[in-house]
Amino acid sequence: MQEFIDNIKSWPLNDIFKSLIERAKISITYYSPVDGKILLINKTAARAINSTPEKLKNQTIYEVFPQLASEIKKRTEEIIANKNEIITKDFIKPTEQTGFWFESSYSPVFTQNNELSAIQITSSDISARIESEKDMEIMQQNLFNQYMREKTLKDLLRIQTMDLKLDQKVAEALRIILNVYWMENVLRGVIFVVEKNNTLKKVASHIRNNVTEEALGIFCDTMPIGQGHCGKVAQSGIEIQPAEADCRCDKVAQEGSIPRSKYIFPIKYEEYVEGVFSFVIRKEFSLDNKEVLFLRSACSIIGIMIRSEKDRVQIEQQRTNLISSSKLASLGEMASGIAHEINNPLAIIIGYSRILLDAARKQEDNIQELMLQLLPQIDLTVGRISKIVQGLQSFSRDGSKDKLENKILKEVITKTLTFCQEKFNRCEIPVEIDINPENLQIYCSETQFSQVVLNLLNNSYSAIKNSEEKWIRINCFIENNQVIIKFIDSGKGIPENIQEKIMQPFFTTKNPNEGTGLGLSISSTIIEKHGGKLFYQNESSNTTFEIHLPLK
C-alpha cells in the first residue's frame, strides 16, 4: 500500500494525475486489497455518498459502502485470485430519501514488480439508464399484456364459429380464460348459465391439477337465482369483488382449506344476465383494473355465446313448429282426397262383406265360390287402406330428430303418393315417375323428404287443376355425382317478376285459405339441411322445380 502511495508521489506528472482524478465526472476510488483502506477517492465518488475525500481518506471501502461490504469483499478476493477486471451493477441508498444505480469497474493495480498493490474502482451513475430500461420493460410488458388480452378475446370470439354444443363452448371459453398467464393463481373457475326455471346451472368447471376440491369446497350444480353470492349476482347483474364476499361456497371444506379470495362476474347480453362466472384465487394475489376490464369483456363474449345458442334453439323450435304447421296445411289441402281415397276401398269392403253375409244367411250353395272370389279383393283393399294410413303416419310424425339414412327414392315418392293419389285421379292429373336407376337411393330423413315431395305435388296440383292440359312428371337420375330430382308439370312457368319471391316465407300465389306460403320456404330449408338445394328452373318450357342432393 505504501509503495502505491510512494509511486503516486514519485510520478513525474503527479499533480496532473491527481487533478485529472479529482476533476473527473465519474467516481474513482483506490483501496488496499489487504485491509480495504481508502488510498485515494475523488470528489465525484465522495459526493455520491454525501461526503468529501478528506472525511473518507482514513476509512475502509467497507465502511464507506456498508450496504455493499460483503459483495466488495467477494470481488476483492476474486481479483486477488485471478488478477482480472470485474464489472458490476449496484444500487446504494446514501439516505432514506435517495438512492441510485451505478456501474463499476474493479481493476487491479500492479507495482513495477508486478505485485498487486491496489484496486481501482471506476464508477458511473446509470440510474437514468436503469429507469429508462425499467420504463421500456414496463412499456413492453404493457404491450404484451394488451396483445394477450386482444388475442384471448379473439380466441373467445372464434369459439362461436365452432360446431360445438353450448356446454362445450363454455368449457372451452373457461379453459382459454384460465390459461392467460395473469390467471395462473386462480385455483378454480366455474361458469353457470341462467335456466328457464329461474335457476343457475353449472355448465363448466375447471380446477388446477395441484389443488383438491376438498381444499376449496364444492360448488352446487344448481342454485336458485337470488340465493348465495352467485345467485345474487345473477339477480342484480352487479359483480362481487373479494372485499365484498368471504370465500364460502354452498359446501365448504373446514380443514386443510386454502386461503383464497372470490371474484364473481355477471355474464350479460345487453342488459340481460345470461350467466355467472365465479373463480377463487389465492388470498395473496389480486387482479388489477385492466385485468378486471378484460374479464368483463370476456364475460360479454360468453354472454353473446349463450344468447346465440338460446336464440338458435328457439329458432329451431319455431322452425319445427312452422314445419308442423306447413305439414298440417298440406294435409288439409289433401284432406278431401285422403277421405275419398279411404272411403272408396271402404265402400268396396262393405259391399263385398254384405254379399258374403247375405249368402251365408241364405246358405247359398255358391258361398264357397263367392268367398274365394271376394275375400282376396277384400284383403287387397284392406292392404290399400293400410298403405294410406302408414303413409299418413310416416308423414305426420315429427322427423326433426331423425338421423339421415339411405332410402330408396322410388319407395319414398310412392309412399307419399298413396295418400294423395285420389286427389290427382279426381282431377284427371296423371303423375308419372321415371327413376334411373330404379333402385336409386338418397341419404335423407324420409319424413322430411316426404314433406318436400308433398309440397311440390300440392303446388303443381293447385297450378294446373283447372288447365286444359294436365300432367305431372317426376324425373330422377344421377349427374355429376349428384342425385337430380325434377318435378315438372304442364304449367307454362312462373312469371319472371315473382320468381325471386317464391322461396320467401309466407309468399303465395294461391287463393286465400288455399295456402300458407310456407311450403317452398320450408322445403328449401329441409333440402339445405340435407346438403342439397331446391330451386326453380326458369329455362324449361314447363314449370320445373329441381332438387340436387349429394350422392352418398
Image (cartoon, grey):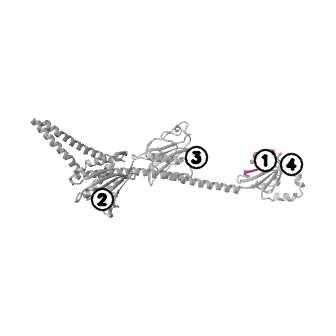
- Mark 3: secondary structure: loop
Query: x%, y% of residue 168?
Result: 46, 46
Q: Sequence order check: which comes first, mark 2 or mark 1?
A: 1
User: What's the residue type where badge 1 is placed?
Assistant: Tyr
Q: Quadrant of residue 495?
A: bottom left
For the question of whether residue 296 can be seen, the reply is no
- Among numbered discs 3 and 1, the one appearing first in the sequence: 1
Instruction: Answer few, some or many: residues within 10 Å of disc 4's Cα (few below 14, many 20 plus, some between 14 and 19).
Output: few
Residue 378 as seen in the image, left or right of residue 415: left
- Which amino acid is tagged 4? Asn
Queried whether the magenta region covers residue 203, the answer comes back as no
User: Would you say residue 80 sits in the magenta stretch?
Assistant: yes
SS for dot 1:
helix
Residue 181 visible in the displayed image: yes
Does residue 309 appear left or right of residue 211 in this picture?
left
The disc placed on residue 285 is 3
Q: Which residues are magenta?
A: 71-93
Classify mark 4: helix, strand or loop: loop
Q: Which residue is mark 2?
A: 543
Residue nearest the observer in this picture, 74 or 61: 74
Rounded to the nearest angstrom, the CA distance separating label 3 from label 2 is 73 Å
Tell me the residue that label 1 is attached to. Answer: 62
Q: Position of residue 511 (x, y in %)?
A: 25, 59
Q: CA distance from mark 3 to mark 1?
A: 39 Å
Mark identifier at residue 114: 4
Q: CA distance from mark 2 to mark 1?
A: 105 Å
